[in-house]
Image (cartoon, rainbow, N blue to C red):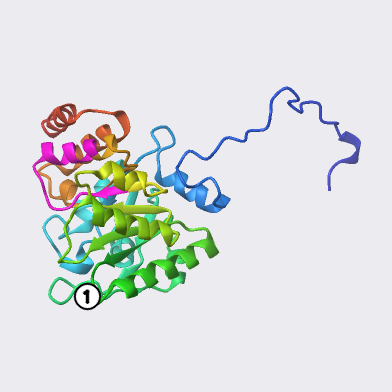
Amino acid sequence: MADLDDIRDGDNFGLNTPADTNSFYLKGMNSVDWGIKNRMSRIFNRKSGRTVMLAFDHGFLMGPTSGLERIDLNIAPLAEHADCLMGTRGMIRSCIPAENTKPICLRTDTGTTILTEMNHNVLLDEAEAISMNATAMAAMIAVGDAATEALTIANISRLVDVGQKYSIPVMGVTAVGKDMARDSRYFGLAARVCAENGASIVKTYYTEGFENVVAATPVPVVIAGGKKLPEIEALELAYNAIQCGAAGVDMGRNVFQSEAPLAMIKAVAGVVHDGLKPAEGLELFNDLKNA
Protein backbone atom coordinates (compact mmCIF):
# COMPACT_ATOMS: atom_id res chain seq x y z
CA MET A 1 0.00 0.00 0.00
CA ALA A 2 1.27 3.47 -0.84
CA ASP A 3 2.57 5.62 1.96
CA LEU A 4 -0.32 8.02 2.60
CA ASP A 5 2.01 10.49 4.33
CA ASP A 6 3.99 11.16 1.15
CA ILE A 7 1.44 11.75 -1.60
CA ARG A 8 2.73 14.43 -3.92
CA ASP A 9 0.47 16.24 -6.32
CA GLY A 10 1.52 16.05 -9.95
CA ASP A 11 3.03 19.27 -11.27
CA ASN A 12 4.42 18.34 -14.70
CA PHE A 13 1.47 17.91 -17.04
CA GLY A 14 3.18 19.18 -20.20
CA LEU A 15 0.40 21.64 -20.83
CA ASN A 16 2.23 23.26 -23.72
CA THR A 17 3.06 19.95 -25.42
CA PRO A 18 0.22 18.38 -27.44
CA ALA A 19 -0.28 14.62 -27.20
CA ASP A 20 1.63 12.68 -29.84
CA THR A 21 -0.79 11.63 -32.56
CA ASN A 22 1.75 10.79 -35.25
CA SER A 23 1.10 7.76 -37.41
CA PHE A 24 3.12 4.59 -36.93
CA TYR A 25 6.25 4.60 -39.07
CA LEU A 26 5.39 1.57 -41.22
CA LYS A 27 2.78 1.90 -43.92
CA GLY A 28 -0.56 0.23 -43.38
CA MET A 29 0.07 -0.30 -39.68
CA ASN A 30 -1.50 2.78 -38.15
CA SER A 31 -4.77 1.06 -37.29
CA VAL A 32 -3.47 -2.29 -36.05
CA ASP A 33 -3.23 -3.04 -32.36
CA TRP A 34 -0.31 -2.35 -30.04
CA GLY A 35 0.99 -5.93 -30.03
CA ILE A 36 1.37 -6.12 -33.81
CA LYS A 37 2.99 -2.69 -33.93
CA ASN A 38 5.41 -3.70 -31.20
CA ARG A 39 6.40 -6.87 -33.04
CA MET A 40 6.72 -5.07 -36.36
CA SER A 41 9.01 -2.51 -34.71
CA ARG A 42 11.34 -5.35 -33.72
CA ILE A 43 11.58 -6.54 -37.32
CA PHE A 44 11.86 -3.16 -39.08
CA ASN A 45 14.61 -0.77 -38.11
CA ARG A 46 13.06 2.37 -36.62
CA LYS A 47 15.56 4.74 -38.24
CA SER A 48 15.49 3.38 -41.80
CA GLY A 49 12.03 1.78 -41.70
CA ARG A 50 13.56 -1.29 -43.37
CA THR A 51 14.71 -4.80 -42.54
CA VAL A 52 17.33 -7.35 -43.51
CA MET A 53 15.73 -10.71 -42.89
CA LEU A 54 17.86 -13.84 -43.16
CA ALA A 55 15.88 -16.72 -44.66
CA PHE A 56 17.02 -20.28 -44.02
CA ASP A 57 13.75 -22.18 -44.37
CA HIS A 58 14.81 -23.76 -47.67
CA GLY A 59 15.53 -27.14 -46.10
CA PHE A 60 11.90 -28.14 -45.65
CA LEU A 61 11.69 -28.19 -49.45
CA MET A 62 15.28 -28.89 -50.51
CA GLY A 63 16.91 -30.74 -47.63
CA PRO A 64 20.55 -29.90 -46.79
CA THR A 65 21.16 -27.63 -49.78
CA SER A 66 24.49 -25.87 -50.21
CA GLY A 67 25.15 -23.46 -47.35
CA LEU A 68 22.53 -25.06 -45.11
CA GLU A 69 24.27 -28.35 -44.41
CA ARG A 70 24.94 -27.18 -40.84
CA ILE A 71 22.63 -24.42 -39.60
CA ASP A 72 24.58 -24.25 -36.34
CA LEU A 73 27.81 -23.51 -38.23
CA ASN A 74 26.55 -21.53 -41.23
CA ILE A 75 23.53 -19.55 -39.99
CA ALA A 76 23.83 -19.12 -36.22
CA PRO A 77 27.02 -16.98 -36.54
CA LEU A 78 25.16 -14.60 -38.89
CA ALA A 79 22.16 -14.13 -36.62
CA GLU A 80 23.35 -11.05 -34.77
CA HIS A 81 23.89 -9.23 -38.08
CA ALA A 82 20.33 -9.78 -39.36
CA ASP A 83 17.29 -7.82 -38.26
CA CYS A 84 15.12 -10.94 -38.28
CA LEU A 85 15.59 -14.69 -38.77
CA MET A 86 13.18 -16.68 -40.93
CA GLY A 87 13.26 -20.43 -40.41
CA THR A 88 11.35 -23.56 -39.54
CA ARG A 89 10.58 -24.73 -36.03
CA GLY A 90 12.93 -27.71 -36.22
CA MET A 91 16.00 -25.75 -37.28
CA ILE A 92 15.34 -22.87 -34.91
CA ARG A 93 14.88 -25.19 -31.95
CA SER A 94 17.86 -27.38 -32.73
CA CYS A 95 20.39 -24.93 -34.15
CA ILE A 96 19.69 -21.34 -33.06
CA PRO A 97 20.83 -20.62 -29.49
CA ALA A 98 17.94 -19.89 -27.16
CA GLU A 99 19.72 -16.75 -25.96
CA ASN A 100 19.26 -15.29 -29.44
CA THR A 101 17.39 -12.01 -29.09
CA LYS A 102 16.75 -11.37 -32.78
CA PRO A 103 13.10 -11.57 -33.79
CA ILE A 104 11.96 -14.83 -35.35
CA CYS A 105 9.67 -15.07 -38.37
CA LEU A 106 8.50 -18.64 -38.06
CA ARG A 107 7.75 -20.58 -41.24
CA THR A 108 4.30 -21.70 -40.21
CA ASP A 109 3.30 -23.86 -43.16
CA THR A 110 4.81 -27.10 -44.36
CA GLY A 111 4.16 -29.53 -47.17
CA THR A 112 5.63 -31.25 -50.19
CA THR A 113 9.28 -31.22 -51.30
CA ILE A 114 10.98 -30.51 -54.61
CA LEU A 115 10.76 -34.23 -55.40
CA THR A 116 6.97 -34.13 -55.82
CA GLU A 117 4.27 -31.65 -56.76
CA MET A 118 4.89 -28.44 -54.82
CA ASN A 119 2.69 -26.19 -52.71
CA HIS A 120 0.40 -28.72 -51.02
CA ASN A 121 0.98 -27.03 -47.70
CA VAL A 122 -0.78 -27.21 -44.34
CA LEU A 123 -0.47 -24.92 -41.31
CA LEU A 124 1.25 -25.75 -38.05
CA ASP A 125 -0.71 -25.55 -34.84
CA GLU A 126 -0.97 -22.00 -33.56
CA ALA A 127 0.49 -23.03 -30.20
CA GLU A 128 3.83 -23.58 -31.95
CA ALA A 129 4.24 -19.91 -32.81
CA ILE A 130 3.29 -18.86 -29.30
CA SER A 131 5.55 -21.39 -27.58
CA MET A 132 8.48 -20.36 -29.78
CA ASN A 133 7.94 -16.67 -29.02
CA ALA A 134 7.61 -15.91 -32.73
CA THR A 135 7.64 -12.25 -33.69
CA ALA A 136 5.94 -13.03 -37.01
CA MET A 137 4.50 -16.03 -38.85
CA ALA A 138 5.01 -16.78 -42.55
CA ALA A 139 3.05 -18.87 -45.03
CA MET A 140 3.02 -19.14 -48.82
CA ILE A 141 0.24 -18.53 -51.32
CA ALA A 142 0.40 -20.07 -54.81
CA VAL A 143 -1.54 -17.72 -57.07
CA GLY A 144 -2.37 -19.21 -60.45
CA ASP A 145 -1.70 -22.82 -59.41
CA ALA A 146 -5.06 -24.45 -60.02
CA ALA A 147 -4.35 -27.37 -57.71
CA THR A 148 -3.24 -25.36 -54.68
CA GLU A 149 -4.36 -21.74 -55.00
CA ALA A 150 -7.53 -22.09 -52.92
CA LEU A 151 -5.77 -24.17 -50.26
CA THR A 152 -2.85 -21.79 -49.82
CA ILE A 153 -5.01 -18.66 -49.77
CA ALA A 154 -7.19 -20.34 -47.14
CA ASN A 155 -3.99 -21.04 -45.19
CA ILE A 156 -2.94 -17.40 -45.20
CA SER A 157 -6.43 -16.29 -44.22
CA ARG A 158 -6.51 -18.77 -41.33
CA LEU A 159 -3.05 -17.71 -40.22
CA VAL A 160 -4.15 -14.07 -40.14
CA ASP A 161 -7.07 -15.13 -37.93
CA VAL A 162 -4.52 -16.62 -35.53
CA GLY A 163 -2.29 -13.56 -35.81
CA GLN A 164 -5.11 -11.18 -35.01
CA LYS A 165 -6.09 -13.27 -32.01
CA TYR A 166 -2.60 -13.19 -30.52
CA SER A 167 -1.26 -9.94 -32.06
CA ILE A 168 1.36 -11.70 -34.21
CA PRO A 169 1.95 -10.23 -37.68
CA VAL A 170 1.77 -12.54 -40.70
CA MET A 171 4.08 -12.48 -43.70
CA GLY A 172 2.56 -13.70 -46.95
CA VAL A 173 5.13 -15.36 -49.21
CA THR A 174 4.14 -15.19 -52.86
CA ALA A 175 4.47 -17.83 -55.54
CA VAL A 176 2.83 -17.88 -58.96
CA GLY A 177 1.78 -20.80 -61.11
CA LYS A 178 4.38 -22.42 -63.33
CA ASP A 179 2.52 -21.29 -66.46
CA MET A 180 2.39 -17.64 -65.39
CA ALA A 181 4.91 -14.97 -66.34
CA ARG A 182 7.24 -13.89 -63.53
CA ASP A 183 6.38 -10.23 -63.96
CA SER A 184 4.97 -7.31 -62.00
CA ARG A 185 1.42 -8.05 -63.10
CA TYR A 186 1.29 -11.46 -61.47
CA PHE A 187 3.56 -10.80 -58.52
CA GLY A 188 1.55 -7.63 -57.96
CA LEU A 189 -1.62 -9.70 -57.98
CA ALA A 190 -0.17 -12.21 -55.51
CA ALA A 191 1.15 -9.46 -53.23
CA ARG A 192 -2.20 -7.71 -53.21
CA VAL A 193 -4.03 -10.97 -52.42
CA CYS A 194 -1.78 -11.39 -49.37
CA ALA A 195 -2.60 -7.88 -48.18
CA GLU A 196 -6.30 -8.26 -48.97
CA ASN A 197 -6.36 -11.32 -46.72
CA GLY A 198 -4.75 -9.40 -43.86
CA ALA A 199 -1.00 -10.02 -44.13
CA SER A 200 1.11 -7.40 -42.34
CA ILE A 201 4.18 -8.07 -44.51
CA VAL A 202 4.47 -9.38 -48.07
CA LYS A 203 7.49 -11.21 -49.42
CA THR A 204 7.70 -11.29 -53.20
CA TYR A 205 10.15 -11.14 -56.09
CA TYR A 206 11.68 -8.07 -57.66
CA THR A 207 10.71 -7.55 -61.30
CA GLU A 208 10.64 -4.73 -63.81
CA GLY A 209 7.82 -2.41 -62.78
CA PHE A 210 8.30 -3.30 -59.12
CA GLU A 211 7.31 0.21 -58.07
CA ASN A 212 3.75 -0.68 -59.12
CA VAL A 213 3.80 -3.81 -56.97
CA VAL A 214 4.86 -1.78 -53.93
CA ALA A 215 2.42 1.06 -54.59
CA ALA A 216 -0.54 -1.30 -54.85
CA THR A 217 0.39 -3.26 -51.70
CA PRO A 218 -0.65 -1.26 -48.63
CA VAL A 219 1.73 -2.98 -46.19
CA PRO A 220 5.55 -3.33 -46.14
CA VAL A 221 6.98 -5.39 -49.02
CA VAL A 222 10.28 -7.25 -48.75
CA ILE A 223 11.97 -9.00 -51.64
CA ALA A 224 13.14 -12.58 -51.87
CA GLY A 225 16.74 -13.03 -52.91
CA GLY A 226 15.97 -15.95 -55.20
CA LYS A 227 18.74 -18.00 -56.77
CA LYS A 228 22.40 -17.32 -56.01
CA LEU A 229 23.76 -14.34 -57.95
CA PRO A 230 27.22 -12.82 -58.12
CA GLU A 231 27.61 -10.48 -55.13
CA ILE A 232 27.39 -7.29 -57.18
CA GLU A 233 24.16 -8.47 -58.82
CA ALA A 234 22.61 -9.37 -55.46
CA LEU A 235 23.51 -5.92 -54.13
CA GLU A 236 22.03 -4.33 -57.25
CA LEU A 237 18.87 -6.37 -56.68
CA ALA A 238 18.56 -5.07 -53.13
CA TYR A 239 19.35 -1.50 -54.17
CA ASN A 240 16.87 -1.44 -57.04
CA ALA A 241 14.12 -2.87 -54.86
CA ILE A 242 14.74 -0.22 -52.19
CA GLN A 243 14.64 2.51 -54.84
CA CYS A 244 11.22 1.19 -55.87
CA GLY A 245 9.93 1.43 -52.31
CA ALA A 246 10.65 -2.01 -50.86
CA ALA A 247 10.89 -2.14 -47.08
CA GLY A 248 13.84 -4.50 -47.13
CA VAL A 249 14.97 -7.96 -48.14
CA ASP A 250 14.47 -11.52 -46.97
CA MET A 251 17.59 -13.08 -48.47
CA GLY A 252 18.88 -16.60 -48.10
CA ARG A 253 21.06 -18.13 -50.80
CA ASN A 254 22.63 -14.81 -51.77
CA VAL A 255 23.94 -14.61 -48.22
CA PHE A 256 24.66 -18.14 -47.00
CA GLN A 257 25.97 -19.35 -50.38
CA SER A 258 28.27 -16.33 -50.73
CA GLU A 259 32.02 -16.97 -50.53
CA ALA A 260 31.98 -14.72 -47.44
CA PRO A 261 28.48 -14.84 -45.86
CA LEU A 262 29.28 -12.55 -42.92
CA ALA A 263 30.72 -9.89 -45.21
CA MET A 264 27.75 -10.26 -47.54
CA ILE A 265 25.04 -9.78 -44.92
CA LYS A 266 26.85 -6.66 -43.70
CA ALA A 267 27.10 -5.35 -47.26
CA VAL A 268 23.39 -5.99 -47.84
CA ALA A 269 22.61 -4.16 -44.61
CA GLY A 270 24.70 -1.24 -45.84
CA VAL A 271 22.58 -1.01 -48.98
CA VAL A 272 19.26 -1.49 -47.18
CA HIS A 273 19.81 0.68 -44.11
CA ASP A 274 22.61 3.08 -44.98
CA GLY A 275 21.83 3.87 -48.59
CA LEU A 276 25.04 2.45 -50.04
CA LYS A 277 25.03 2.08 -53.79
CA PRO A 278 25.82 -1.37 -55.19
CA ALA A 279 29.45 -0.52 -55.99
CA GLU A 280 29.91 0.85 -52.46
CA GLY A 281 28.30 -2.27 -51.04
CA LEU A 282 30.68 -4.44 -53.06
CA GLU A 283 33.63 -2.41 -51.83
CA LEU A 284 32.47 -2.98 -48.25
CA PHE A 285 32.03 -6.69 -49.00
CA ASN A 286 35.57 -6.98 -50.36
CA ASP A 287 37.05 -5.02 -47.46
CA LEU A 288 35.31 -7.25 -44.90
CA LYS A 289 36.09 -10.42 -46.82
CA ASN A 290 39.78 -9.62 -46.91
CA ALA A 291 40.05 -8.26 -43.38
Q: Residue at x 23, y 43 (%)?
A: 209
Q: Amino acid at mark 1?
A: Thr
Element under disc 1 = loop
Q: Residue at x 56, y 49 (%)?
A: 31
Q: Residue at x 36, y 39 (%)?
A: 50
Q: Is residue 19 left or right of residue 123?
A: right
Q: Residue at x 23, y 35 (%)?
A: 239
State which quadrant residue 132 falls in.
bottom left
Viewer can see residue 120: yes
Q: Is residue 49 left or right of residue 226?
A: right
Extreme residue toward the top, this view:
16
Locate the C terminus and report the quarter of the image it occupies.
Answer: top left
Viewer can see residue 96: no
- Viewer-closest of 266 and 210: 210
Residue 23 is one of the magenta-drawn residues: no
- Viewer-closest of 187 and 140: 187
- Viewer-closest of 47 and 190: 190
The location of residue 144, given as percent across then percent down, is: 24, 67
The location of residue 206, given as percent across then percent down, is: 22, 47
Q: Is residue 127 left or right of residue 244?
A: right
Residue 238 is one of the magenta-drawn residues: yes
Extreme residue toward the front, this view:
185
Give the class, few, some or many, for how many residues have Cα within 10 Å of label 1's Cα (few <14, many ≥20): some
Q: Which residue is mark 1?
A: 112
State which quadrant residue 59 falls in.
bottom left
- Viewer-closest of 188 and 242: 188
The location of residue 72, given as percent across then percent down, is: 23, 56
What segment carries the magenta color? 222-240
